[in-house]
Amino acid sequence: MRFVEMNVFGVYVAPISLLMVAAWIVTVTIRWPAARYGLLRYVWHPALVVFSVYVIVLSSMVLVIAS
């Protein structure tokens, strides 16, 4: 599949920017229960873990859409 610019309300945006927003929303929905039940207390650096989950979600979305 070829990634081409998408028209969003009359503005052409790169598809990676839309995927980044979608990955951020997925990461927030994953982070909320983890913070609520205290799972982030058991990691060394919570912000680094959240960023790593974001990168994993974003790369997974790109791989699924590209194939």
Image (tube, helix red, strand yellow):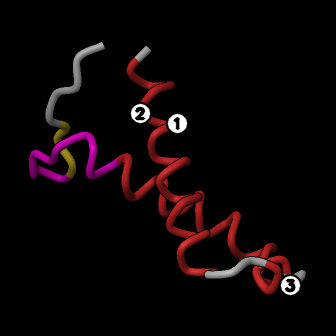
The residue identified by callout 2 is 62
The image quadrant that residue 37 belongs to is bottom right
Instruction: Establish if 30 lies above or below 22.
Output: below
Picture coordinates of residue 48, whole percent (x, y):
54, 73
Q: Earlier in the sequence, mark 3 or mark 2?
A: 3
Instruction: Specify whether 45 is left or right of 61.
Output: right
Instruction: Specify whether 18 is left or right of 25.
Output: left
Q: What's the distance in space between the residues labelled 1 and 2, CA to CA?
A: 5 Å
- Label 1–label 2 contact, CB within 8 A: yes
The residue identified by callout 3 is 38
Stretch of the chain drawn in magenta: 9-18
Q: What's the distance in space between the residues labelled 1 and 3, CA to CA?
A: 26 Å
Q: How many marks?
A: 3
Who's the residue at 27% across and 44% down the image? 16
The image quadrant that residue 29 belongs to is bottom right
Instruction: Establish if 35 lies above or below 59.
Output: below
Q: Quadrant of the C terminus?
A: top left
Instruction: Specify whether 36 is left or right of 47.
Output: right
The residue identified by callout 1 is 60
- Looking at the rendered structure, the kind of residue marked 3 is Gly
Instruction: Establish if 14 lies above or below 17.
Output: above
Q: Callout 1: 10 Å neighbours few (<14), some, many (20+)?
A: few
- Looking at the rendered structure, the kind of residue marked 1 is Ser
- Looking at the rendered structure, the kind of residue marked 2 is Val
Q: What's the distance in space between the residues labelled 3 and 2, CA to CA?
A: 30 Å
Taking depth in this image into account, of 11 and 66 the one nearest to the observer is 66
